[in-house]
C-alpha cells in the first residue's frame, strides 16, 4: 500500500459520500501519474470495488473497469490540448463545465482528467475555478502536473494536492533544508555571498532541486496567505516553517518570486549558466523578502 499512497489518499477522499472532489496529482513521472489517475477514475466508476484497508479499490474485471482501462468509459473524460495545439483552451473548459452539469451516463460518478494541467491557458483555468472549488456531488476532477509550480496558484488552491513523487526526491530536498532556511532568514549579504557560493558548487541537477523547492515554498506561501489555510503543502517544508516565512514574504511577493523561479527552472533545464541561475533564484526571494521588511 505504501508505494501507492496517493491512490489511497484519493480513495479516502472519494469515499466521503455526497461530495465532488478536485484533486491535483503532482511530483511524479507523467506515466506513473497517468496510472494513478486511471486507478482513481476506475474506482469512481467500478461496480464491485474490492475493499483493502477499508478503501474501495477498482476490481479491474467489471465492464466499467475494462472500459476505464481502455480510456473508453463514457463517464471518464481525458482532457488534452486539441490536435495542432499545445494548450488546453477555454473551449475545453466550457465543455467540461457543461459535461459536469449533466448526470453520468452509466456510472455513479463522472471523472474529468486533465493529464497536463500545466497546459491550461489562464483563461481556461479561470473558467474552471468555480467548479473546482465546489464540484457537483457526482463529479471528480483530477488535474495532473509534473510540477505544481507550473499550475496557477488560484487553481492549486482549489484542489486537494496529492504528491506522487518518490520518497528519495523528498529526502534529497530535505538535505537542503538548512540552506533553504538561510535563504529566507539570513541577511541579504549572507545569502548573496555565502549561500551563493555554496549553491554554485552544486551539480546542475542539485541546483534544479533547490530551485524547485524554493519555487514550491513560494507557491505554498502565496496560496497559504490567499486562502488562510495551512493544508496545501506543495513544498516539503514543515508547516511551522512556512508559518514563519509567511510573515517574511507576503502573498504578492511570494507569487511574483514563484513566477520568477519557474523561469529560472526553465533556464537551468535549458543549460543556462548555473551561477547566473543561482544568483537570479536567490535574488528572486531575497529582494522581495527584504522589500517586504522595509515596507513594514
Ligand atoms: Zn470494477
Image (cartoon, rainbow, N blue to C red):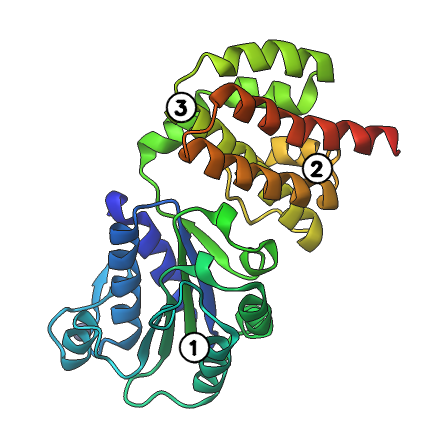
Marks 1/3: CA distance?
Answer: 42 Å
Q: Residue at x 53, y 44 (%)?
A: 233
Instruction: Please say if 175 is above or below 22.
Output: above
Residue 60 falls in which quadrant of the image?
bottom left
**Residue designated by label 2:** 246
Residue at 64% across / 42% down in the picture?
221
- Is disc 1 placed on a helix, strand or loop? strand
Instruction: Tell me, yes or no, whether the two marked residues, 2 and 1, touch with CB atoms within 8 Å.
Output: no
Q: Nearer the viewer, residue 162 or 12?
A: 162
Q: Residue at x 48, y 22 (%)?
A: 274
| Mark 1 lies on residue | 139
Residue 168 at x, y = what percent? 32, 30
Residue marked by disc 3 = 204
Where on the picture, by quarter, is residue 87?
A: bottom left
Would you call the spot at circle 3 few (<14 residues within 10 Å), some (14-19), or many (20 or more)?
Answer: some
Instruction: Kindly state the secondary structure of the residue where label 3 is placed.
Output: helix
> What distance separates the C-alpha of mark 2 from that of mark 3?
28 Å
**Foreground pick, 55 / 131:** 131
| Marks 2/1: CA–CA distance | 34 Å
In the image, 229 versus 34, the foreground residue is 34
Q: Is residue 150 left or right of residue 104?
A: right
Dot placed on the residue nearer the N-terminal end, 2 or 1? 1
Would residue 63 appear left or right of 199 to someone viewing this image? Answer: left
- Earlier in the chain: of badge 2 and badge 3, it is 3
- Point out residue 99 in the picture as x, y percentages from the top left corner: 43, 85
Q: Residues within 10 Å of mark 2 (few under 14, many from 20)?
A: many
Q: How many other residues sit within 10 Å of disc 1, few (<14), some (14-19) or many (≥20)?
A: many
Circles 2, 3 touching at the beta carbon (< 8 Å):
no
Amino acid at each position: 500500500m505504501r508505494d501507492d499512497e496517493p491512490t489511497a489518499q484519493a480513495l479516502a477522499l472519494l469515499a466521503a459520500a455526497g461530495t465532488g472532489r478536485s484533486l491535483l496529482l503532482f511530483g511524479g513521472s507523467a506515466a506513473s501519474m497517468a496510472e494513478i489517475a486511471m486507478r482513481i477514475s476506475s474506482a469512481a466508476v467500478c461496480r464491485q470495488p474490492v475493499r483493502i484497508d477499508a478503501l474501495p479499490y477498482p476490481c479491474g474485471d467489471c465492464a466499467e473497469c475494462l472500459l476505464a482501462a481502455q480510456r473508453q468509459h463514457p463517464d471518464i473524460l481525458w482532457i488534452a490540448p486539441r490536435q495542432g495545439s499545445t494548450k488546453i483552451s477555454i473551449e475545453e473548459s466550457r465543455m467540461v463545465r457543461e459535461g459536469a452539469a449533466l448526470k453520468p451516463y452509466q456510472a455513479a460518478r463522472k471523472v474529468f482528467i486533465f493529464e497536463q494541467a500545466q497546459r491550461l491557458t489562464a483563461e481556461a483555468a479561470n473558467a474552471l475555478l468555480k467548479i473546482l472549488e465546489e464540484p457537483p456531488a457526482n463529479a471528480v476532477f483530477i488535474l495532473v502536473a509534473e510540477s505544481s509550480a507550473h499550475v496557477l496558484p488560484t487553481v492549486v488552491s482549489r484542489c486537494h494536492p496529492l504528491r506522487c513523487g518518490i520518497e528519495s526526491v523528498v529526502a534529497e530536498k530535505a538535505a537542503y533544508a538548512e540552506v533553504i532556511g538561510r535563504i529566507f532568514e539570513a541577511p541579504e549579504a549572507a545569502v548573496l555571498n555565502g549561500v551563493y557560493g555554496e549553491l554554485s558548487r552544486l551539480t546542475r541537477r542539485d541546483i534544479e532541486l533547490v530551485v524547485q523547492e524554493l519555487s514550491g515554498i513560494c507557491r505554498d506561501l502565496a496560496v497559504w496567505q490567499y486562502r488562510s489555510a495551512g493544508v496545501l503543502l506543495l513544498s516539503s517544508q514543515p508547516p511551522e516553517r512556512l508559518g514563519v516565512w509567511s510573515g517574511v514574504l507576503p502573498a504578492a511577493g511570494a507569487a511574483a518570486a514563484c513566477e520568477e523561479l519557474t523561469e529560472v527552472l526553465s533556464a537551468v533545464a535549458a543549460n543556462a549558466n548555473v551561477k547566473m541561475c543561482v544568483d537570479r533564484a536567490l535574488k528572486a526571494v531575497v529582494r522581495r523578502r527584504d522589500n517586504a521588511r522595509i515596507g513594514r
